[in-house]
């Protein structure tokens, strides 16, 4: 593995009905849903390190602690960023943020664990 503190990742999406709070039954409002913002932050974190892991290993999300700061209406682009802030063995800690076209809409911490994919999948069966 070739991981270093400071590695970054980014993921983007456009707000459509399917990723609004109303679509997932989280408040009935046609704005970017918090679960979707968290998912975008997780994707940015995964992208920051995925290509640098040893063959057969992946990272999986284990903790999310974020604040959703502002609402984003349908039609706007949302960008999530992740910065690898700490490496503690198999535990990776990311500082995550999300922005729409006007402002920062979310911030927090996301942790991922490095696992052997084959062993991980065997535990599911």
Image (cartoon, rainbow, N blue to C red):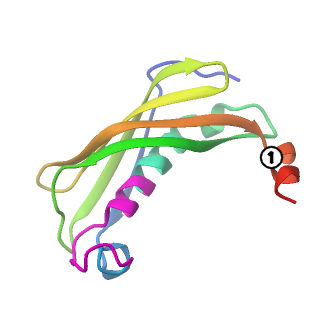
Query: Who is closer to the viewer here, 119 or 28?
Result: 28
Badge count = 1
Q: Residue at x 35, y 78 (%)?
A: 25
Q: Quadrant of residue 62?
A: top right
Q: Residue at x 86, y 43 (%)?
A: 119
Q: Quadrant of residue 58?
A: top right
Helix, strand or loop at mark 1: helix
Question: Which quadrant, please, contains the N terminus?
Answer: top right
Q: Position of residue 78 (x, y in %)?
A: 28, 58
- Seen in the picture, residue 50 relative to 68 is either above or below; the reply is above
- Residue 33 magenta-drawn? yes
What is the chief secondary structure element of the magenta stretch? loop
- Residue 121 magenta-drawn? no
Q: Residue at x 81, y 40 (%)?
A: 56
- Seen in the picture, residue 85 relative to 57 is either above or below; the reply is above
Q: Position of residue 76 (x, y in %)?
A: 21, 67
Query: Who is closer to the viewer here, 2 or 22?
Result: 22
Q: Position of residue 94 (x, y in %)?
A: 44, 31
Badge 1: residue crowd in 10 Å (few <14, some 14–19, many ≥20): few
Q: Residue at x 65, y 31 (%)?
A: 52
- Seen in the picture, residue 73 relative to 71 is either above or below; the reply is below
Query: Who is closer to the viewer here, 123 or 16?
Result: 123
Badge 1 is on which residue? 120
- Seen in the picture, residue 24 relative to 53 is either above or below; the reply is below
Question: Which quadrant, please, contains the C terminus?
Answer: bottom right
Q: Which residues are magenta?
A: 24-39
């Amino acid at each position: 593995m070739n991981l270093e503190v400071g590695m970054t990742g980014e993921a983007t999406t456009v707000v459509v009905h399917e990723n609004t709070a109303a679509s997932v039954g989280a408040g009935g409002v046609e704005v970017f849903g918090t679960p979707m913002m968290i998912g975008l932050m997780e994707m940015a974190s995964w992208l920051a390190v995925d290509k640098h892991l040893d063959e057969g290993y992946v990272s999986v999300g284990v903790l999310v602690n974020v604040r959703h700061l502002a609402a984003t209406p349908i039609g706007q682009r949302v960008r999530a960023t992740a910065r690898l802030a700490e490496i503690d063995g198999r535990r990776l800690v990311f500082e995550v943020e999300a922005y729409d076209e006007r402002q920062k809409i979310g911030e927090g911490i996301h942790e991922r664990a490095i696992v052997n994919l084959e062993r991980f999948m065997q535990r599911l069966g």
